[in-house]
Every structure is written in C-alpha cells, then in structure tokens.
Image (cartoon, rainbow, N blue to C red):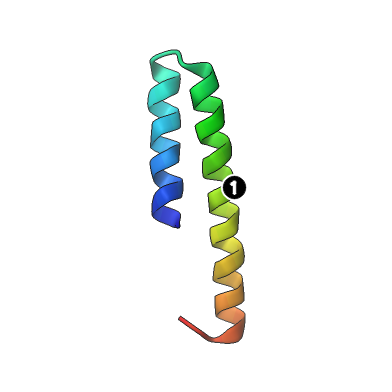
Amino acid sequence: MLRYSLIFLIVAIVAAVFGFGGIAGAATGIARVLFFVFLILLVISLITGRK
C-alpha cells in the first residue's frame, strides 16, 4: 500500500511539473488517503503483533 502511495505521489509531482493541476490534485489526494490507510494498518498490526 505504501508503494501505491508513492506511485501516486510521483504521478502528482510529474503532473504538476507539466501543468496538469487537476490531475496533480487528484493524485495527491489519493496518495494522502492511501498513506493514512497504510499508517492505520501499520499501527493495528503493531498493536496486535501480527506481521
């Protein structure tokens, strides 16, 4: 999940460089959501002791 978050972040940066503001904003939002889902799952995994 962290990999997808980084991919969307790279897409957002590339889109911003080329001037595609709408796509960059959407990709940034998706990357942010995926990153927070990753963090929540990581915390749950650490609390329960599962890998």
Relative horizontal placement of residue 31, taking residue 18 as reference (left or right): right
Q: Residue drawn at (38%, 42%), measured in percent from left and top?
A: 7
What is the x, y in percent for residue 45?
55, 77
Question: Most extreme residue toward the bottom, as rendered?
Answer: 49
Count of numbered circles in the view? 1
State whether residue 22 is above or below residue 36.
above
What is the x, y in percent for residue 13?
42, 28
Q: Residue drawn at (56%, 79%), measured in percent from left and top?
A: 46
Question: Most extreme residue toward the top, as rendered?
Answer: 19
Within the image, what quadrant is residue 49 found in?
A: bottom right
Within the image, what quadrant is residue 39 found in?
A: bottom right
What is the x, y in percent for residue 3?
39, 53
Relative horizontal placement of residue 44, taking residue 17 as reference (left or right): right
Please identify the quadrant where the C terminus is shown: bottom left
Relative horizontal placement of residue 34, taking residue 19 as reference (left or right): right
What is the x, y in percent for residue 21?
52, 18
Q: Nearer the viewer, residue 48 or 26?
A: 26
Please identify the quadrant where the N terminus is shown: bottom left
> Callout 1 environment at 10 Å: few (<14), some (14 to 19), or many (20+)?
few
Relative horizontal placement of residue 46, taking residue 2 as reference (left or right): right
What residue type is disc 1 on?
Val
Q: Residue drawn at (54%, 41%), measured in percent from left and top?
A: 30
State whether residue 18 is above or below residue 11.
above
Q: Secondary structure under badge 1? A: helix
Residue annotated with mark 1: 33
Within the image, what quadrant is residue 26 found in?
A: top right
